[in-house]
Image (cartoon, rainbow, N blue to C red):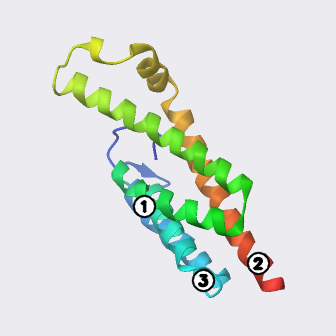
Amino acid sequence: WGGVGFWIPDGFKFLNISFKHWGYFLYGIFWLLVFLFGRKKMSPYTLAALAALSFFFLPTRVHERYLYPAFAFLIIVASQIKSKILISLVILLSLIHFLNLYYVYVYYNEIYLNLPKVLYNSQIYNFLKDYGKEFSILSTAIFVLISLILIKHIYEIRKD
């Protein structure tokens, strides 16, 4: 949701529907598609990875900590299906997540705790501040790609 703006109320409306309700709607549609197209052939690790990813990316007002479990399950799934693309996407997503954590850490320490700026690299912080929306959009695109790769893998299993 950072792609549309940071620290905005989730009651903000798009097409007369709040972001909060859009998040619930997208989350529901995502799981409807998962259950319709592949849950019977998905491993518990794949389902857990998709659960953690979708819960982090789709609803509003979700804390960064909810993405951590996805990495553990994604690493297991990537090693099971031996997908270099999936491993690359997981590494990229984890790097973006780290940068996101860095930005939030600095933001709260500077704004709320009034810690001196010498405690962090202001060039990295300012870069992340300037390109935060782009990183958010990129990480959401990675979520979509990972989901598609996992669902595509299910269809390849069904052909066998």
Residue 16 visible in this rendered orientation of the protein: no
Residue drawn at (63%, 57%) of the image: 144
Residue drawn at (43%, 63%) of the image: 55
Amino acid type at mark 1: Pro
Q: Compare marks 1 and 2 and give the one earlier in the sequence.
A: 1
Task: Determine the secondary structure under disc 1.
Answer: helix
Work out whether 132 lies above or below 71.
Answer: above
The image shows residue 2 at horizontal and vertical percentages of 46, 41
The image shows residue 7 at horizontal and vertical percentages of 33, 39
Mark 2: few/some/many CA within 10 Å (<14, 14-19, 20+) = some
Work out whether 91 lies above or below 18.
Answer: above
Mark 1: few/some/many CA within 10 Å (<14, 14-19, 20+) = some
The label shown at residue 69 is: 1
Amino acid type at mark 2: Tyr
Nearer-the-camera pick, 18 or 153: 153
| Residue 112 left/right relative to 142 | left
Label 3 sits on residue = 39
Amino acid type at mark 3: Arg
Label 2 sits on residue = 155
